[in-house]
Image (cartoon, grey):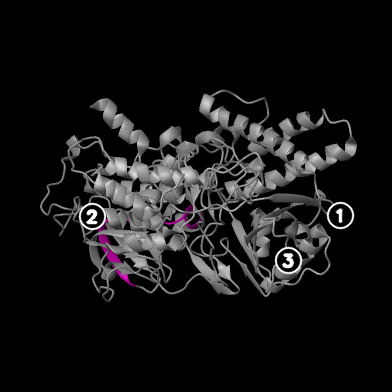
Amino acid sequence: FTLPKNVTCFFLFLFDIPKFLADWLVFFFAFAESEEKIENFTGAGHKFRSVCRFSPLRFGPKTSGKVVLGAGARSGSVIAVAVGTMADEAPTGSGKSGAPSKKRKYKVIIIGAGMAGLSSANHLAKNGCTDFAILEARNRVGGRIIGIDMGTQKVELGANWIHGVLGNPMFELAMQHGLISIINIPKPHKVVAATEDGRQVPFQTLQEIYEAYVCFLRRCEEYFLCQYLPPPDIHSVGEHINLEAELYLNNVDDQKEKHLKKLIFECLLKRETCITGCHNMDEIDLLELGSYTELQGGNIVLPTGYSSILKPLCDTLPRENIVLSCPVKTIHWKRKAGRAHSGNNNSDTILEEDEEELDSDDSDKTVTEVPIGGKAASAATASTSDTNENSFKHYTSNVQLECDDGTVYEADHVICTLPLGVLKEHGRTMFVPSLPVYKMESIDALLYGTVDKIFLEYDRPFLNAKISEIMFLWEQVEPEPDADQDEYLKANWFKKIYSFSKVSDTLLLGWISGREAEYMETISHEVVAEKCTEILRKFLKDPFIPKPKRCVCTSWHKQPYSCGSYTAIAVGASQDDIENIAQPMYSSPHQSKPSVLFAGEHTHSNFYSTVHGAYLSGRTAAQILLTPDSPQEIVMESDSSDLSSWIQGIALE
């Protein structure tokens, strides 16, 4: 049951329904139509794991709606190479007009104009603080949100979907600005699986193994949710699923059937690496898989592209506050020992000009926050650069930023939204003094994998009109113990491509993850196109499949401002590591507000790897600076779409 948007709005206006109820009615009409049939394995999205809460496609391949078999893998993470052209293109949503400011000193400087950075700036501006600047290394805003046009299609090189509706601020923002069409009829999504010799797998077999796989995945998530221990010597998701699959296949007598079902399990695990953002599921901690919170309501595609959601955020920001093509090289964040606040009476507050410093006896703030989870309690002091007085400059603000071009900015507070991959690559040298040991240990412990996309554009359609995805059941070739890894990747990298799905009749999309994705980034698009043509001809048993007229591949790993795709919790890591990274840092025990705060998808312990996780973390960082200094609980404003908060509010009343 659906109603045209104008009819719905007129109905709501006519009866003067309160806003929160109006929002929910609009959502109901949108959500009711997104329900899709599971029985026939049809759907509109890319996520196998969409039953109940099991559909974690954060930045990338998640399904939209209740899709049972899809082409899912998170949308590679971000900036990408489009046929030799990287995503450093014209600025997107650059905000209000005006030339970049020559000002070099601000109350707040935000590093990065991705979703977390824009969210922080937007929240500051809405609350009356405009003395801030955003320093963005690229020549555009959006970070890992970027799309291009291929033919008549808008394709996403980075984030694909709004993952979930209930409580998702991205959905609320998109609805407020008319970016979502509530009249969106999903297309049937039929999946076909084939072996290397071109044999198509019976649909019943595919459905049987998929359902078993979902059950195994649920059990993995239950270890976190129910807090019970896994079998001995089983530490990763991959180990657990392989054990379950082996026990399951032991009940199959026919060897050919058994082998075929094993290939399907292996294909689903490859797909899971794209969803999770890793090379192999053996890298993902079993006890932490369920830590990611899946928002209900299916996955939403923005018809005008995900980048369209950036404009409402940028429109509230003065154009001169956004500095593009400005990579930050060094962050000096701590005053010299014994140096008091000088020449700046407002270094610890944003909105009040003359706030006194807290007496040290009244402050429980240490130089850096205590780590969570008991890691490196002595880590508050840094390493070699902490004692290097020559590298530390005298300045009056809390933080000084040096950019690649030599420009120096000063700020009382800095919100750092650098991706986890950049922190892994440059975290030890970028901060002066170095980051606390506990924070660097957590940065190292978390996984930041690579997921890339391959787009193939054709002059004419060649895939059966009823088929929307073809899964590849590769025969596994394990490398010899003493084999050269580079040679192995060169000969087998393409076997990590688990499927190609239709974006349109003449546009196909494939996913690849891990070291194979990193290798693909080193070869030409022509080589990738030729290999993909061989794959399609082989599995479809059709030697006349044409070569694509255009091939676009992302390259998130080699991009200096992303260094990968998105965050996952590796074996041995935990949510505590995410919270450690999110801990703000104080340059002095006298401070009432932190000098450096961290935001980004890697700092949200429940929504890591998502756009809404990045958005919420940015808003939280800004709120910390806006909150009065008197000790009190930080209460974030709840959007009307946040059902859980709404219910809690009713209960409190």
Residue closer to the observer: 488 or 541: 541
Q: Which mark is residue 197?
A: 1
Report x, y in % for residue 555: 59, 64
Specify the quadrant that holds the C terminus: top left
Does residue 370 sit above or below 343 in this rendering? Answer: above
Report x, y in % for residue 626: 22, 48
Secondary structure under tag 3 reads loop
Dot 1 or dot 3: first in sequence order is: 1
Q: Which mark is residue 78?
A: none
Q: Over which residues does the magenta segment extend? A: 407-423
Q: CA distance from mark 3 to mark 2?
A: 51 Å
Q: Nearer the viewer, mark 3 or mark 2?
A: 3
Q: Residue at x 29, y 57 (%)?
A: 122
Residue topped by disc 2:
126
10 Å crowding of disc 3: few (<14), some (14-19), many (20+): few
Residue topped by disc 3:
462
Residue closer to the observer: 117 or 375: 117
Residue 510 appears left or right of 443 = right
